[in-house]
Amino acid sequence: MKSYKIILSGGGTGGHIYPAIAIANELKLRFPMTDFLFVGASDKMEMQKVPQAGYRILGLWISGFQRTVSFGNLLFPFKLLFSLLKSVQIINAFKPDIVIGTGGFASGPVLHIASIKGVPTLIQEQNSYPGITNKLLSKKVNKVCVAYDGLERFFPKNKLILSGNPIRQDLLDLEQKRVEALAFFNLDSAKQTLLVLGGSLGARRINQLIESKLKYFNELGVQIVWQCGKLYSDDYIQHNASDLVQVHAFINRMDLAYASADFVISRSGASSVSELCVVGKPVIFIPSPNVSEDHQTKNALTITKNKAAILIPEKDLDSRFELEFSIVLNSKPQQELLSENIKKLALIKATETIVDEIEKLLVK
């Protein structure tokens, strides 16, 4: 039985961490004897999430270059140099057969050093508009797996593989889980359910919107499962007193949350968008305007141009939200159109496709 030594690097947000874990899990199924090592940023959430998934991780002293003047920018050259030197040590000691990057600042130094040393490399770009790290790395790596068409304007065309983003396998066949989901969240099957997601840390503006519209939702008879994020749970937990509102800092059973929902309000990070295409429920995307290259808006636009979701910028929430939500709530044909169109965009075999490409590089 073949065994390999594989480094995976990516992090900073769940959108970079969970795809890396999904790829590792699929590789582990195919090659059970393989030795895995994750490399992340030493002060980011991957240092907890990766060990929880059963893999070991080493941290680099690395962070991004801020667009505003800050003390952190003065440290950036030192952090980069330190991380490059540490990456040399890691690769020399571990001797990987391949290095895989899923985005985030930690992946830059590791993949750069691996490519210099002739180690096969692959990056998985989740967004429709790539970040600077992956744009620079694409010139050096062997393959680039992407989730959207049209990325040859950023990456070498001969390296591109349209794979989609890895998703949790428990999101397939959600209809079979509907009854279990309603019981799990103690929801009324006679009422429609709105699922609100702001990412693992939460989204301040989405939380403010939902709190300001609680009376409006109550009048409509809509029940809410609201993931407010761990940063904001103390601010909103008191709304659990209402029969129609459930506030969660974090939802561990996302399969049941999606299965319970009739509608979803969500940020449009790459992983969320990919999951919601598989889930196939009517979605209102509220992109974060505070991310690099405004990539969440670009992600959402790739969906809305296919009439597969609704996009409301944060600045337009006060003027547009009630109108847009009421149209979807009260129009069965509109709900069905959004559901059918977003399902057409799902790439449910993404993880397998990415690992197929990794296998090709391993046997060279």
Image (cartoon, rainbow, N blue to C red):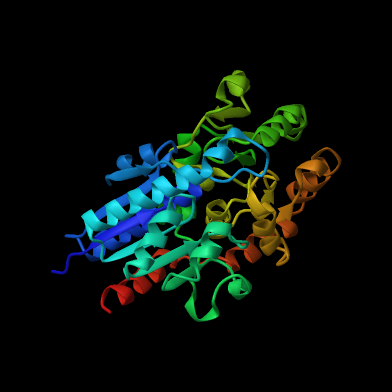
Quarter-wise, where is residue 150 in the image? bottom right
Q: In the image, 327: left or right of 221?
A: right
Q: Quadrant of the N terminus?
A: bottom left
- Label count reads 0
Q: In the image, 341: left or right of 96?
A: right
Q: Quadrant of the C terminus?
A: bottom left
Residue 151 percent coordinates (x, y)? 60, 71
Residue 280 percent coordinates (x, y)? 58, 58
Nearer to the camera, 205 or 45: 45
The residue at the point 20 percent across, 60 percent down is 34
The residue at the point 53 percent across, 47 percent down is 258
In the picture as drawn, the residue positioned furthest to the bottom comes out as 158
Nearer to the camera, 257 or 197: 197
The residue at the point 76 percent across, 47 percent down is 313
In the picture as drawn, the residue positioned furthest to the left comes out as 1
Nearer to the camera, 144 or 182: 144
Residue 254 percent coordinates (x, y)? 47, 44
In the picture as drawn, the residue positioned furthest to the right comes out as 319
